[in-house]
Image (cartoon, helix red, strand yellow):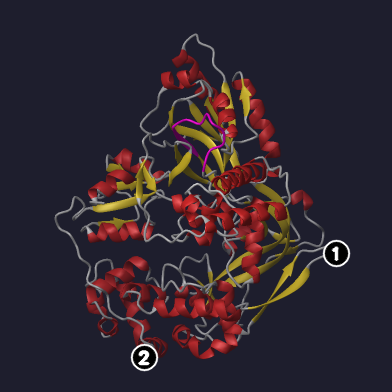
Amino acid sequence: MSREKPESRIAELRDEIRRHDHAYYVENAPVISDRAYDAMLEELKALEAEHPHLVTPDSPTQRVGGQPIGAFKTVRHFVPMLSIDNTYDEAQLREFDGRVAKALGAGTYRYVVDPKVDGVAVSLTYLDGALATAATRGDGQTGDDITHNVRVLRSVPLRLLGKDAPGRLEVRGEIYWPTEDFSKFNESRREAGEDEFANPRNATAGTLKQLDPKNLAGRNLRFVAHGFGVVEPMPAKTWSEFTKKLATWGIPVASEQAVADDIEGVLKLVHAWDRKRHALPYLMDGLVIKVDSFTQRDELGATSRYPRWCIAYKFEPEQAESVVLRVDYQVGKQGTITPRAVLSPVALSGTTVRHATLHNFDQVDRLGVHIGDTVLVEKAGEIIPQVLKVIEGKRPKDAQPIRRPTQCPECGGDVEKDEGGVYLRCVNPTCPAQVKERLIYFAGRDQMDMEGLGEVMIARLVDEGMLRDFADFFHLHKRRDEIEKLIFEHERPGDGGAKVVKVEFGKKRTQQLLKGIDESKGRPLSRLLAALTIRHVGASTAEDLAEHFETLEAIRGASEEALLEVEGVGPELAHSIHRFFHSDWGRKIADRLVEAGVNTRQPKRAVRTDSPLSGKTVVLTGTLSSMGRKEAEELIKSLGGKPSGSVSSKTDLVVYGEEAGSKLEKAQKLGVRTVGEAEFLKMAGK
């Protein structure tokens, strides 16, 4: 066999597979069966295994199997990824058009209208046709390098199609999770006894921040282009023309794109899409209206935050009618009883909504909700749907008012109103519902962060008698065999109705669960204190306590007077902490945690006194691309600064990320210094 034969066959297979990837993932029009596609891919893998010197980074075989990375690197965008100004008001669209007309003078112009896909903004850079880097938007100046994860996405070509692709192409777009695929993935998590993801956008963001690309398997994320950075050479004069070129190179573009000759045409598109947006296979929360001509865009320019040539029109939060079937009562970790409406299933924001919070009983009275009522439900990007109002004209004759419970709905214990008179609380500390909620909180990500332990699993372990208090987590290894054999039942839709599926928890998940628990033993004392659900003690207070006393033993032995010496601890809080550690239950649980080998010391924080943040009060707002909120707060503290949750005249600095909100506006009004993520990282020496 000659060398030319494997080379030519490998090249032929790569081209074929790229074309079929494009047909399937971009055009949604597959032309061969899955079996035929798999056969081609297997043949290519076999040939590359025989001739490893012929393997190239852009081969379809190189999408999966990459090694995990240790941490995300920062990428600087050559052209900043600016935010887009937005509005919910048609009058403001007309004002935008007026500004465009005034700036362009007598020249004619037209708009191109793209769907605003509710995903995660990214930038892809191709050099000589090959994917070089993929990065998150970040603060617009810098973002995280997520190339290792994006290479897994089959809708993103590793090599551009055709022969006329530019030498450098920087294309911007959204990575999103199609709603049907998202629902199926959540169903598989339910079957495995794992917590469901709240919504597609947050789940997509979390997926792209995975260090191991293998974790993207089965998630079927997609990419769609909505803009560009550097293109050398640029082959088009308008966005509508350029998107056609992108499609020929294999880059997914929005098939729903439309062109409007004036603002009246734009408004017609707005009205049409508001009616039909729910039929799309992805979440769309608005439309982006852009001047089509690149020359005119250059004339219009940009502010420091927004381009002047485009605006996003956002649809009102999605709402739907549903019927209140009954009301459940949720008992929280501190005994607070929250009414929750059980609804007839309704599709909202990419998920099927079956429940909505009623917040508290005063809210129930204000809304006048009855069981049997038809209500308007909203899920405005929030995780928890809420009831907005009652459709009183649809109230049935047998509708029943919702009554405040006089006993705890879970344990039958006494209830009392809180100090403000708004909430009802169960006062029984051994209430099973409170126990479950406390255990769920203890294991949560911001507390002990026990990987592999979700709400469903913890509730089951409580029901099985394996978990009664915090210390029991650290004895679950003795119940390994029982955990492996736990059976979870789930309803799965099928022909002829729902079917009950039984799934065993199994050895692999049990091993992951026990590993997560064992790793949690090493968390710092501040995490442990926050996890104990001591009344009024949150993460910030827990950290102040841990850094002041340094050991759990010292806190347990502290008097109320000694506790008052901690910054931010007042008489009520000092009494609550002292009472917890001197109660029979508090003493017992602390002793058992120590016996289980849980860390009870706070590591000394290395604090710089020479940094620009030393002695400064710093407020964070928006989403940072390079780190989470907790990590950013830790960084501020290590630099001698003090993180704060609110802006006031005493605030020294506000750090803003993507989608910064009212805190940024308040800081600007007060004259407080504000910096973006890139400047913040520079100040931190990153």
Left or right of 638: which side holds 589?
right
- Highlighted range, magenta: 159-172
**Which of marks 2 and 1 precedes in the sequence?**
1
Question: Quick check: 510 above or below 9?
Answer: below
Image spot of residue 276 (x, y percent)? 70, 38
Can residue 488 be seen in this snapshot? yes
Image coords of residue 79 (percent x, y): 38, 34
- Name, please, the residue furthest toward the front: 1
* Callout 2 amino acid: Glu
Which residue occupies the foreground of this view, 120 or 421?
120
Residue that label 2 marks = 595
Residue kind at label 1, given as amino acid type: Gly
Q: Position of residue 472 (x, y in %)?
A: 47, 86
Sort mark 1 into few (<14), some (14-19) or many (20+) by Cα contacts within 10 Å.
few
Q: Looking at this view, name the residue that lies furthest to the left.
A: 610
Predominant SS of the magenta segment = loop
Q: What residue is shown with label 1? A: 496
Depth check, front residue: 378 or 551: 551
Q: Which residue does the image show at 25% across and 83% down from the upper left?
A: 554
Answer whether residue 161 is magenta in the image.
yes
For residue 375, say whether it is visible.
Answer: no
Q: Are marks 1 and 2 in contact (CB under 8 Å)?
A: no
Per the rendering, the mark at residue 98 is none
Q: Secondary structure at mark 1?
A: loop
Task: Tell me what residue is drawn at x 56 percent, y 33 percent.
Answer: 162
Is residue 669 shown above or below 572?
above
Name above or below for residue 77 compared with residue 567. Answer: above
